[in-house]
Amino acid sequence: MARTAILTLSILLVTAASALASEGPGHDGGEGWYGLTNDKIITNAGFIVIGGIPLFILFMSLAQHKLDTRKAKRKAAAKTRGDADVWKGGW
């Protein structure tokens, strides 16, 4: 256990230097892949998340309802055919 703790601590200390390094050549200055952001962009992204989660839940619930309906129809059809576990016919 002590070896694991020492190894973990040493790995964290070695990698912290590169994480805290100052800007070098080719550094983007903290700009992300979207570009410069301001309060309006962050707010709109938040609204998209707020609206997107309920829409995702709605569409997944509709898909589950459709699949459950198909399952119920398959079960009803198998019940009207008789016992589906018994092999009827063949050689």
Image: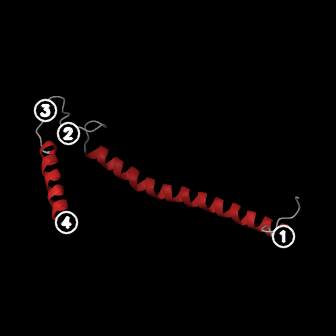
| Of the image marks 1 and 3, the number of the one nearer the N terminus | 3
For label 1, the SS is loop
Tell me the mark number nearer the camera, choosing from 1 and 3.
Answer: 1
Residue at left offset 50%, top offset 59%:
57
Q: What amino acid type should be assigned to the residue bearing mark 2?
A: Gly
Residue 42 in the image: above or below residue 29: below
Of badges 4 and 3, nearer the viewer stands 4
Q: Are marks 4 and 3 in contact (CB under 8 Å)?
A: no
Local packing at callout 4 (Cα closer than 10 Å; few below 14, some 14-19, many 20+) is: few
Query: Residue 85, relative to residue 13: is it above or below?
Result: below
Report crowding for label 1: few under 14, some 14 to 19, many 20 or more residues within 10 A (C-alpha): few
Q: Residue at position x 19%, y 29% from top?
A: 26
Compared across the picture, whether 46 is left or right of 52 comes to: left
Name the residue tied to disc 1. Answer: 82
Secondary structure under the numbered disc 4 in the rendered image: loop
Pick the residue in front: 79 or 70: 79
Mark pair 3, 2: CA separation = 12 Å
Answer with mark 2 or mark 1, whichever residue precedes in sequence.
Answer: 2
For the residue marked with disc 4, what is the amino acid?
Met
Query: Between tags 2 and 4, which lies in front?
Result: 4
What residue is rendered at 70% in x and 60% in y? 70
Label 2: element kind? loop
x then y, percent, for residue 28:
20, 34
